[in-house]
Structures are given as structure tokens and as C-alpha cells.
Image: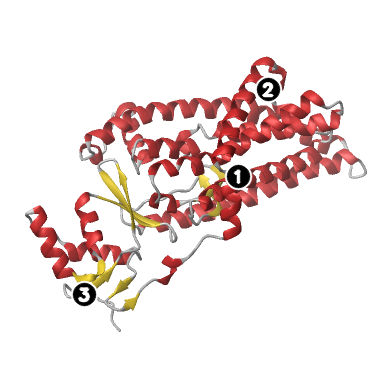
Amino acid sequence: MSSALTLQSIVDCSHLSIQPEGDEFSIGDSSIGEFLRVPEVAVDVVRLLDGKNTLLQVKEKIDRKYGEDVDVLDFVEMLKDCDLIYKIDSEVLNDSFRKEVNPVLFRLGSLFFSKTANLLYVVSFAALILLLILYPSLIPTFRDMFVFEPVGLSGLIFLVVGWGLTLIHEFAHLLAASKEKVHSKIRLNLRMIFLVAETDMTGLWGKPKKNRYVPFLAGMAWNTVIALGCFAVQLLSSSELVISFARMIALIALYGFVWQFIIFLRTDIYYVISNWKNTSAMHEHSLMFLRKTVLRKEPAEWASLPLHEKNNAKWFGVLYIIGGFVSVTLTLYLQVPALWYTLSYAIRSLSTYTYSSYYFWDSLMVVSVGAIELVIWLIGLKNARKERIAQRNKPANREQEAI
């Protein structure tokens, strides 16, 4: 049976969700994570694609309402290209729309991100700030990365714990999205040259705007609780080893929290602001503004942007500069000293000790940890290239969420 579209076709898109986004709307389906940002006329078309009207009947109603010739057939063709049509005539094109989220994940998400739990996260954040003010010694330094004197062993522990906490952060996003009955998946990717783990939650576009904030902030909420717990351990424990581990975990958790303010890497805070300001292209528009302001090069697309998008891009550009300051601060305060200390140790040990010495093998462990990080980075690079290829093949107004 042919699924070719004509004006006599009867199309069923009754499964699609419609959510207002400022002057536009997001249409799509949360179960497959495909969404389009469209004007109101397109929403009226979708509402008429109920599996009862022919496209000719839909077109006649839309033309009558707007007093102009609307190319309904072309729009429906685009819906088909995006796999957003359930049925054409009696032929089912995509039966994956009926997928349900894992019930275990839904129950866990409902538990960990209930109203009571969310209130506790806010209280935990306030307590965290208070402890940092009252006990400045709790503020982590780069030396907290090294639990033991042997740098290689400490580096391996830091690598394992760091990636473990990263997965916990992303799992929080996944659970919060599952509570909203949104399918999501965790993957490795690159943001510029930085390797990141991210959770694809594109299906959130099918949910009301206010329901998206908790999934966006879920990872930071768990980082806050973890860091607060580590601070409590440091204040209450008398074991140096336990305190050392607590300081290392607190460092990783707080680093992951502050990292989210590097907005130009499209972090959690980036998506919170994008959702608040109803923009699906904050990153691209901000870069246009910065090129126009800093490099004095005005991209051709800038002139065609709506006024509200230009205004958003201007203050987003300022936030990008703040994000750059956060990035430089983290690099100079933590990454550069830690890298210098580690490399100095490895070079000194390899040039001083023979293979019969523990320090020689510990230095080789430093090299091994670096090699593991490189392999993980290459996996992220591979995924980033796949994503760029996929993005080039998508319509310009298709939405994506991965944080």
C-alpha cells in the first residue's frame, strides 16, 4: 500500500502534543523525541489532522480562516519526513508513538522528584551555601584530587569516582524525565573540545513549560545533596582517610555544579534559560551577536531574526562572557595546578626510579589514566560527529534537548 500524500489523503496526527513557546508552538511526540517549532497556522493544521478529514478539507478550512493560500500538502510532507505522522489513510507509518516509559524508572522518578523531594533539594542548597560561609576550609582545592601520596593510584580513583558521579548526575536527569513520561538516553559527546556525558531529553518539548525545569535541574540537585553529605562527613568524622575521600567527592560534585554555569557549552543552566525565554536557538543567536559585537561581522541571518530573539541574544551574549569567566576560573584554580603537579610527578619518577621501584609503576599508572581519558574523549568525538551529520539532515526548526 502506498503512503504517498495527495489532497485526497486522510492523515492522522492526533497523537502529537502542542505546547506554546512564546509566539510559536512546539509540536511533536514525547515518546520518540521529535519536535518542530512552528507558527499558529501550522498548529491549526495539526488539530485538523485527526484521521477523519482529507487534506483537501483541511486546506479549505485553513484557507478560509486565514484568507490566503496555505500550502498544507507541503507542511504535511515535512511532518512525514520527520516521522511525525501516525497514519496515512489506513496505513500505519510509525507504531513507536505508543511506547511507554519504563514503569520502574517512572516510580523512582516520582519518588526522587516529588514536591517534597524538590523542597528538600532547595533546603540542601541553602544549607550548602551556609556551610561554605561558616566553614571556608570546606572549599575544595586541586590537592583534594589526590587521596593517597602515590599520584597514579589517586588519579585512577579520581577517574573512577568522577565518572561514577557523572553518571549519577545524568541518571538524575533520566529519572526526572521519566516522571514526566519522557523517554531519554545517556550518551558521551563533545562540547567544543570538552568531553561531556549528556542526557537526551528531547521529549520534554511535548510537556508544559513549567514541567521541564525539574528535569533540567535534576543533576544539579543531586550534586548539591552529595556535596552537602560530604561536608557533613568532613565536620563529623575523625578518620583522615574518610575525610580525604569526602573532600575528593565534594570537589567532583561542586565542580560538576559550577560547570553548569559555563552556558556556551549548552549545560543545564543553558536549557533552563532557553526554556524560560522561549527560544530554541539561544546558542546560535548568541554567537551571531558576539560576532557582530566583538568581531564587527554581522551575519546575514542576524537581520532576519525577530526583535525578541535579538534582544534575547544580547543578554545571552553577556551570559556567555560570564560563562567564559567561570571556565577560565575553573581551569586556573583546579585543572592547571592538578595537571602540572601530575606531570611533574610522572616525569620526575620515570627519570629517577627504575622498574623495580613502586614509584616507577605508579608513574606508568598516570600515563595509563591519561590513555583511558583519551579513549573516552575519542568516543565522545565519534558521537559528536554523528550528531553533526544528523543535524545537517534535519529541518532548521527541529528541536533538540540533551544536557
Outermost residue on the top side: it is 134
Mark 1 secondary-structure assignment? helix
The three-letter code of the residue at mark 2 reads Ile
Q: Foreground residue, 12 or 378?
A: 12
Mark 3 secondary-structure assignment? loop
Task: Give the label on residue 139, or none.
Answer: 2
Residue at 73% over, 39% down: 158
Q: Which circle, 3 or 2, is nearer the viewer?
A: 3
Q: Foreground residue, 310 or 9?
A: 9
Mark 2 secondary-structure assignment? loop
Pointer 3 residue: 9
CB atoms at circles 2 and 1 under 8 Å apart? no
Pointer 1 residue: 112
Outermost residue on the right side: it is 356
Label 3 CA crowd tier, 10 Å (few <14, some 14–19, many 20+): many
Quote the CA–CA distance across marks 3 and 1: 46 Å
Residue 258 image offset from top left, x and y in percent = 57, 30
